[in-house]
Image: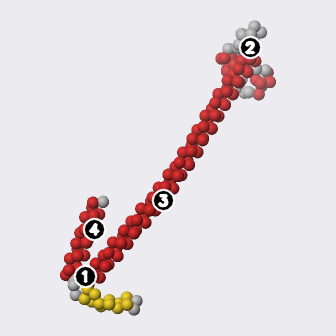
Amino acid sequence: MQLLLVAALIFASVVAVFALQNAQTVPIRFFGWQRETSVAVIALGAAMVGALTAILAGVFRQVSMGLRARHLRAELDRIQRELEEERTAKSALVAQLEQAKEAALAKEQQKGTGEEGEEAPVEALETGEPLEDGEALGTEKERSRDPSWPE
């Protein structure tokens, strides 16, 4: 920013020196309008028009960047809300999955309960290994459907 200010001051100094050294009058014609004025006035006027154009372009850029930033903040807020909704939905699904696992495990344990009311070992439920009485968990039909069932 300071470099830009220094450059603007140097440019203004050069224009002022040019205007002071070229004070003679010249005729100017512009769309049927005719007038005689000094070169200094023309140079200063052109510099002012250029400066105003640059300032307007800078203001336009700042406004457009501000609008873009506002739009991006709104989009970020929307995406963060969606992310939070997805996290909530994921948590609910994970809780449902845990409940379903517990229910399935309880159901398998009820199936594997012996005559004395003892529960079958969890390892036997998971691997299909034979129980103490020599029988594997699952029916013959279940074993024939699952190729990974141990023989």
In the rendered structure, which disc, 1 or 4, sits on the residue that comes first in sequence? 4
Q: CA distance from mark 3 to mark 2?
A: 69 Å
Crowdedness near tag 2: few (<14), some (14–19) or many (≥20) residues, C-alpha within 10 Å: some
In the rendered structure, which disc, 1 or 3, sits on the residue that comes first in sequence? 1
The residue type indicated by label 2 comes to Thr
Q: Which residue is mark 2?
A: 113
Q: CA distance from mark 2 to mark 4?
A: 91 Å
Q: CA distance from mark 2 to mark 1?
A: 107 Å
Q: Residue at x 25, y 64 (%)?
A: 6
In the rendered structure, which disc, 3 or 2, sits on the residue that comes first in sequence? 3
Q: Which residue is mark 3?
A: 67
Q: Residue at x 77, y 24 (%)?
A: 142
The residue type indicated by label 4 comes to Ala
Rendering quarter of residue 7: bottom left
Crowdedness near tag 1: few (<14), some (14–19) or many (≥20) residues, C-alpha within 10 Å: many
Q: Which residue is mark 1?
A: 40
The residue type indicated by label 1 comes to Ala
